[in-house]
Amino acid sequence: MDRIKIKDLEVFGRHGVYEEENRLGQKFLVSACLYLDTRRAGLRDSLEDSVNYGEVCHRIAAFFEARACKLIEAAAEALASELLRSFEALRGLTLEIKKPWAPIGLPLSWVSVEIERGWHTAYVALGSNMGDRQSYLGQAVSGLEDNPDIRVEQVSDWMETAPYGVTDQPEFLNGCARISTLLEPEELLAYLNQLEQQAGRERIRRWGPRTLDLDILLYEDRIMERPALTIPHRDMHNREFVLRPLCQIAPGVCHPVLHRTAEQLLQCLVERADSGAGCKEGRNPAGGASCKEDRNPAGGEGCKEDRNPAGGEGEREHG
């Protein structure tokens, strides 16, 4: 990723734990490394295709004048979020805030906090089999779009599917969304649970009927297992109703544990259902190279020529 660097921008602010710091204010030095793709701007010699570092500097100065935080850790978090939300081309940043006049009663050059933040690509499965299913799914997409820390980039078609696990219930309407988010996985999960609650979701019966079901399938290449969250989704490779909409918008996305693309996982699942036997260990059911070799390193949807293996009308673009 290309970088634009800002070094030791001098600003005035009232951040600090002590009353005198809030009342009198003091000098801060801010350095930022902005991560973005500058190639288009360089080829076209166009500022519109880059990030205006002058605007970034003035935005930083205005932030320090308008906000007062007790901790420079809090100032760094709030400033990073504001910059990432405000500049469309900015994919990530490293931000350091130096405090030269830290009141500790000992000589020092400065105390600083440095953080790295950015947009992360994630895939979210959506499902509903109660009430007005399409309305619930539409409300979920709107809820994602309403969060300033989430950008909805693409949504699959809604697909009618049979219930999974518990079959004595109505059919589901399922889909998948690709998002960019500033939220960490646990924070994203908490927000998805909030959207489910707003839709009247009640967790009475495992795999039972629900107004809205939202699951994180993939979050970049992150592999994690927590009591309330496992990434990648532990059973996504066994669920056709998950893989088909995922393949419609991102057939080339790679499962970081199984090292196969979504398209390969879907074909393996279909073969397994047809033959009654599983795919052999290490076998690439789609033929050719594994996803480690042919995956899209930018986290996109893979080859456009066969990007809609599920058929239908194709994906809807958002944002």
Image: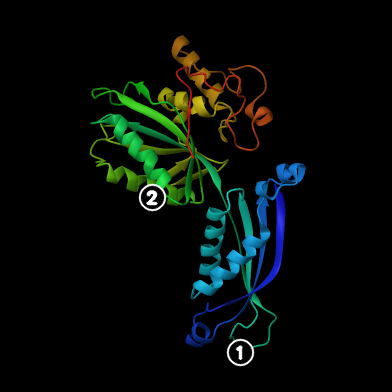
Is the image coloured rainbow, by chain, by secondary structure, or in one colour? rainbow
Residue drawn at (50%, 21%), measured in percent from left and top?
A: 266
- Rendered location of residue 123, percent (x, y): 48, 37
Under mark 2, the amino acid is Ala
Q: How far apart are marks 2 and 1 (CA)?
A: 42 Å
Which residue is label 2 attached to? 190
Residue 105's label in the rendered image is 1
**Residue at horizontal 44%, vertical 50%?**
186
Residue 185, given in percent of the width and then of the height, sits at 47, 48
Height in image: 147 above or below 297? below
- The amino acid type of the residue labelled 1 equals Gly
Q: Residues within 10 Å of mark 2 (few under 14, many from 20)?
A: few
Task: Decide: is 277 above or below 159.
Answer: above
* Image quadrant where residue 62 sits: bottom right
Mark 1, Cα crowd under 10 Å, few <14 / some 14-19 / many 20+, is few
Disc 1 on helix, strand or loop? Answer: loop
